[in-house]
Amino acid sequence: MPIEMISATALKAILAGSEEYAFLDVREHGQYGEGHPFFCVNAPYSVIETCAPVLVPRRDVLCILMDDGDGVADRVHARMTQMGYSNLRVLDGGAPGWSAAGYTLFKGVNVPSKSFGELVEHANETPSISAEDLREMQAEGGPLVVLDGRSPKEFHKMSLPGAHSCPNAELAYRLPEFVPDDSTPVVINCAGRTRSIIGAQSLRNLGLKNPVFALRNGTQGWRLAGLDLCHGEVPQPQPALGADAEALAADRAKTLIRRFNLTTLSPADFDAMCRDATRTTSLLDVRTEEEYLRAHWRGANHAPGGQLVQATDEFFGTRNARIVLSDDVGLRAAGTAVWLMGMGHEVYILEADARMGSETGPEPRPTVSLPQQIALTDVAQAVAQGARLYDASRGMSYREAHIEGATWVTRARLSATDAGPAPIVVIGQSTDLVFGVMQRLNELGATNVSGCVSTPEQWCAVGYNVVSTPYIPEEAACIDFLFFVHDRHNDNLEAARQYLAWELNLLGQLDAQERATLNPLMATEPEVV
């Protein structure tokens, strides 16, 4: 199929419209994080077969592919065409062409969400507290609750002394179990800025009497103040709600829906939406993973509300699609809807208790199967007989551990020389990555390619010599890892300063079109006090 190109100027006009589209950056994660358009979602070529169906479920939606001007988007175009996508364009000149047209390439990840968080703080004058002042409050020993609005995994890595893990979407819902009265001060923290602001403002949107603050600059600000963090703390399970607390949550959901003019949706109306093949309708369950696994509605994907707001571009890739949020009594869905609507999304709240759903367990995800496999115990013999051994793991994983003699490869950089006439064994820790490398090698003319998905522990167990190479692949080659301030949470204080400066400067980089999409919702009636 011939490839239809689109200019940066023509694409910019599409981004300002109301029709559905997906703008996919098909470069690897590190390249994406070094600079991408504001509305672009990362869908790396290395895993496009399993990534694209999640981000872009409707296969006739307009889908624009962007690479580095190096032909990768052409290869993705071919693969997605084979997958059934029928309305594809390739951005002329790729990311360099976008920049040459005078448009901004943004560093970092989750840029729309983080830009939005800064706007929320300005629009609502969300109160914040410095690390030094919080530490002083803790030392005084008065009533105080510190809630960490990040994921439990992030809390385990590092946390504030005395903090409790309570992801942002859970804050309003679980608050009665953490805060004993309406006078105790509450501080919300994250690792930087966005989730502290969003979490604190989520509670303020309820009209609480409690003083609520965002910890300015999060755990990074805490370290920059010379204060120590805790590491390895085990987050406690989220407290179950009693009958009174659940009734309060339901009442607060109704209040949020009224005050912010949110739209609810009956199951019948939702079913009608899903029958409309001309639109994308995504059902997202914003509860905790444990609740989702116990029961959820058919077709619902798990998207914990706090992370959904923080990283919208990791959960859906079709702009102007319909987003339907599911929970139990409506509070977590309503709180999440406030923020998603402020970011310009079309959002609905499903009026159905997800605890009554008939589905259990994890959501089904797209999978791939290796076209030809080789047992791990047979790899050494194949290599001894002249086979090339390639490692398709992530670049940083290869640095940490790989079989001695294995060459690191990444799908986007493979050439005909890498295919060659000799048999090839592709080993790696991810089926998706191994499959992608095998597919490209076969496409380049290799005739005998086998794959083996396995781990360093398994390599050691069967007697392979496993080695590390801290600087191979070198940074320039390691395109699947973002080196930009990557060690800011590992006590590199200069990187933390750079990150915070980057986040604070995001709004100044937006053009009028980009800025116009972000409009924090304001309540239609005064706060209840």
Image (spheres, rainbow, N blue to C red):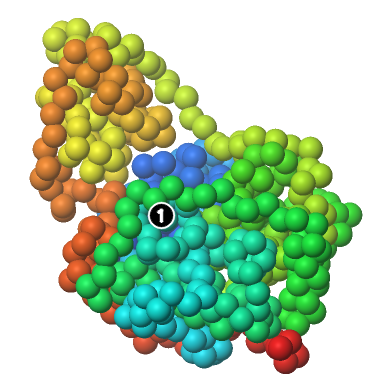
Q: Is residue 18 left or right of residue 328?
A: left
**Residue 109 shows up from this direction:** no
Vertical position of residue 167 compared to residue 10: above or below: above
Residue 333 is situated, as x and y percent measured from the top left of the image, at 69, 63
Quadrant position of the C terminus in the picture: bottom right
Vertical position of residue 241 compared to residue 125: above or below: above
Residue 16 is situated, as x and y percent measured from the top left of the image, at 55, 78
Q: Residue at x 37, y 32 (%)?
A: 430
Q: Nearer the viewer, residue 376 or 310?
A: 310
Count all numbered tags in the image, as a single digit. 1
The 10 Å Cα crowd at callout 1, few under 14, some 14 to 19, many 20 or more, is some
Residue 216 is situated, as x and y percent measured from the top left of the image, at 39, 79
Q: Nearer the viewer, residue 150 or 305?
A: 150
Q: Which residue is mark 1?
A: 154
Residue furthest out toward the front: 141
The local secondary structure at tag 1 comes to helix
Vertical position of residue 11 compared to residue 302: above or below: below
Q: Quadrant of residue 207?
A: bottom right
Residue 412 is situated, as x and y percent measured from the top left of the image, at 29, 44
Q: Residue at x 49, y 60 (%)?
A: 164
Vertical position of residue 123 compared to residue 67: above or below: below
Q: Quadrant of residue 220?
A: bottom left
**Residue 183 shows up from this direction:** yes
Q: Residue at x 60, y 64 (%)?
A: 178
Q: Residue at x 80, y 57 (%)?
A: 243
Q: What amino acid does circle 1 point to? A: Glu
